[in-house]
Amino acid sequence: QVQLVQSGAEVKKPGASVKVSCKASGYSFTNYLMYWVRQAPGQGLEWMGMINPSGGSTNYAQKFQGRITVTRDTSTNTVYMELSSLRSEDTAIYYCTRTTGMDYWGQGTLVTVSS
Amino acid sequence: DIVMTQTPLSSPVTLGQSASISCRSSQSLVHNDGNTYLSWLQQRPGQPPRLLIYKISNRFSGVPDRFSGSGAGTDFTLKISGVEAEDVGVYYCMQATPFPHRIIFGGGTKVEIK
């Protein structure tokens, strides 16, 4: 069965970077795009970026351009999302989700940005 | 930019009764390929979102048939026929197309039991 397992919670100081991982299993990793979506406390969903695991091409939401980097490791079927220059407003749960249709989701990774 | 507006913000429902959620887009969601990539997600408290409906009216694997989607163009509806306790949560409509790449979420509708 399809599973997306994310790395654990992180606490970061303002200005730091965070790197969240998403390990995929149960399907052909390079056949499906992978997306990152975040959700601030009590708020809605926000698309951040995506990667094509086959060739590594990426597409980022304009809001995060310059701060986000999404990469993948095909040897371990893992996608990474790194967000830099963190500020308190980046405190959120970060999700990976498969394909444009968002048919499967990771369990989420809480990133807390606090001094 | 396309804006997706959901109504109501909150929907208190009696167990066994039906609930309807509206999602209105500021522009037609009909894609160049003829498809309309409008989906519905459910997010139970403390859980990640879960895909319920894709391309307006297609139920995803394992989704109970009490969930149904309808609509066209700019107006879409999710209906829950016979709400059960496990249906409590926030529901989001979503437009997602790969080419041109566009992901837009509605603001969410909270379904709760009266």
Image (cartoon, rainbow, N blue to C red):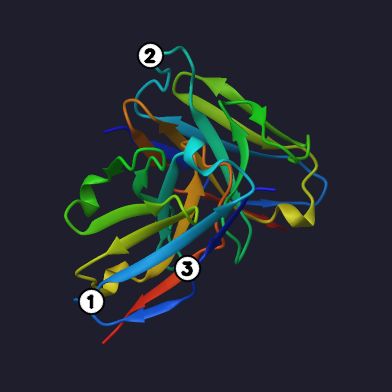
Q: Residues within 10 Å of mark 2 (few under 14, many from 20)?
A: few
Determine whether, in the image, residue B90 is placed left or right of residue A7. right
Nearer-the-camera pick, A82 or A42: A82
Q: Position of residue B46 (x, y in %)?
A: 60, 67
Q: Residues within 10 Å of mark 3 (few under 14, many from 20)?
A: many
Three-letter amino acid code at the position of disc 2: Asn
Three-letter amino acid code at the position of disc 1: Ala
Question: Could you give the CA–CA distance between mark 2 and mark 1, rounded to whole angstroms?
Answer: 42 Å
Question: Which is in the foreground here, disc 2 or disc 1?
Answer: 1
Question: Could you give the CA–CA distance between mark 3 and mark 1, rounded to whole angstroms?
Answer: 17 Å
Nearer-the-camera pick, B111 or A36: A36
The residue to which callout 3 is attached is A109
Q: Position of residue A110 (x, y in %)?
A: 45, 71
The mark total stands at 3
Q: Secondary structure at mark 2?
A: loop
Three-letter amino acid code at the position of disc 3: Thr
Q: Position of residue A91 (x, y in %)?
A: 35, 71
Q: Secondary structure at mark 3?
A: strand
Q: Is residue B106 visible?
A: no
- Quarter of the image for the C terminus of chain B: give it: bottom right
The residue to which callout 2 is attached is B32
Nearer-the-camera pick, A53 or A83: A53
Q: Image quadrant of residue A81?
A: bottom left
Q: Secondary structure at mark 1?
A: loop
Q: Earlier in the sequence, mark 3 or mark 1?
A: 1
The residue to which callout 1 is attached is A16
Q: Is residue B1 above or below residue A95?
A: above
- Asked whether the beta carbons under mark 2 and mark 1 sit within 8 Å of each other, the answer is no
Question: Could you give the CA–CA distance between mark 2 and mark 3, rounded to whole angstroms?
Answer: 35 Å
Label number found at residue A51 = none
- Quarter of the image for the N terminus of chain B: give it: top left
